[in-house]
Image: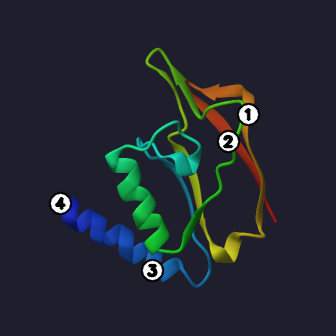
Amino acid sequence: MSANRSRLFEIEAITHAKGVGVFIAMDSNSRCTSWHETLTNTIGRILEEFLTSKQLYIMNEESDYTTIQSRRGTSNIDLTVISDQLLRTVVEWEISEQERCPDHSIIRYAIG
């Protein structure tokens, strides 16, 4: 599947799911202060603009822990993104201080 076609599919999937709610857990490989990174890179700015344009919300909260820890450093590139229909449903978001898979932290949250 071409990059353009794949991107189109993703946008259509989000559009069709807007009525019932969107929940996305992603390894964004992007950095942005909106998800508690120390800086914003180009990919992070583009992703932030896309999420805002689709009225999607980032659940990530500020934490003493990061979503990834590797030999190359630490970062918060793993995101939990939801639509407004789920704002009151997805709660207690946190980064596990103990569990990892293998260099990504386990992210916990409650639904309902």
What percent of the width, then of the height, locates residue 81?
57, 59
| Residue extending farthest top | 71
Which of disc 2 and disc 1 is earlier in sequence? 1
In-image side of 86 versus 33 (left or right):
right
Disc 3 + disc 1, Cβ < 8 Å: no
Secondary structure found at label 2: strand
> Marks 3/1: CA distance?
31 Å
The residue tagged 1 is 96
Residue situated furthest bottom in the rendering: 19
Check contact, mark 2 vs mark 4: CB within 8 A: no
Residue lying at the far left in this picture: please name it: 2
Q: Amino acid at mark 1?
A: Ser
The residue where tag 3 is placed is 15
Q: Position of residue 41 (x, y in %)?
A: 37, 43
Report the quarter where the C terminus lies. Answer: bottom right
Q: Amino acid at mark 2?
A: Ile
Q: Residues within 10 Å of mark 1 (few under 14, many from 20)?
A: some
Q: Which residue is mark 2?
A: 107
CA gap, disc 3 to disc 2?
26 Å
What whole-number distance in Å separates the C-alpha atoms at marks 4 and 3? 20 Å
| Residues at discs 1 and 2 in contact (Cβ within 8 Å) | yes
Name the secondary structure under disc 1. strand
In the rendered structure, which disc, 3 or 1, sits on the residue that comes first in sequence?
Answer: 3
Q: Position of residue 43 (x, y in %)?
A: 34, 49
Say which residue label 4 marks: 2
Q: Nearer the viewer, mark 2 or mark 4?
A: 2
